[in-house]
Image (tube, helix red, strand yellow):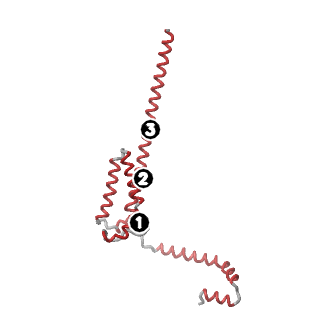
Amino acid sequence: MATVEEKVNQAIAKGLGEEALAEKFEQHGEAFTGFLGDVQANLLSQLNAHSVGPEGFVENFQAFRSAVDWSEPWIQGILVFHLLLWIFFIVTRRSFGAQVGLFAVILTGTRLSEFINTCLRDRWQDFSRQNYFDEHGIFMGVMWAGPLLILGFTMLVSLLCQTASLLVTVKTKQFKRELAAKKDGGKSKTKRGAKDKKA
């Protein structure tokens, strides 16, 4: 069976020029590309049909949970760190300054997650039994940045609810003040009218 290079050389020997070869390739190239696309789709569907990896969210979660050695002290430290952040958030949810500070810590921690992943990928043997730090940062995303982002989003929702509640309180007081001013304004007009009649 002749290779593509041999067929091209034979076509050139028959007198077909490069332009004629390019024209023939254009005619048959689309069919060949379609054929390759079909072969690729069939191979992918067969591979997916016989896949042994996790497919759904629950299976991915279970695979992640079983792949991580939860007894390692530094992993437990990360979990305790996130727990302390949540406790701090709940305790200080009425303190605007503390919430702003916590939000800054969350943003900084999230922003530095890629840098932290790179540093830990180079030094994982110093503190861990296995390397969790791939170049895509999956572990750091799940164990570090993900919980920080969830806490940050929860903080935003909490601040939005507090703002809405404060707005309702302010508007209610403003409405009561205006209503009281109208009542006082009506009484003072009738008192002035009675004084004018006496004079």
Residue nearest the viewer, comparing 133 with 59: 133
- State the separation of the CA atoms marked 1 and 3: 43 Å
Residue nearest the viewer, comparing 47 with 140: 140
Could you tell me the amino acid type at mark 1?
Ile
SS at badge 2: helix
Whether 76 is drawn above or below 89: the answer is: below
Q: Which mark is residue 158?
A: none
Determine the image quadrant of residue 4: bottom right
Residue 137: x, y in percent?
A: 41, 66
Residue hosting label 3: 168
Residue 98: x, y in percent?
A: 36, 48
Instruction: Count neighbours of disc 3 (C-alpha within 10 A) and say few if under 14, some if 14 to 19, many if 20 or more.
Output: few
Residue nearest the viewer, comparing 187 with 45: 187
Q: Residue at x 40, y 50 (%)?
A: 155
Whether 76 is drawn above or below 130: the answer is: above
Residue 112: x, y in percent?
A: 40, 61
- Left or right: where 60 falls relative to 198: left
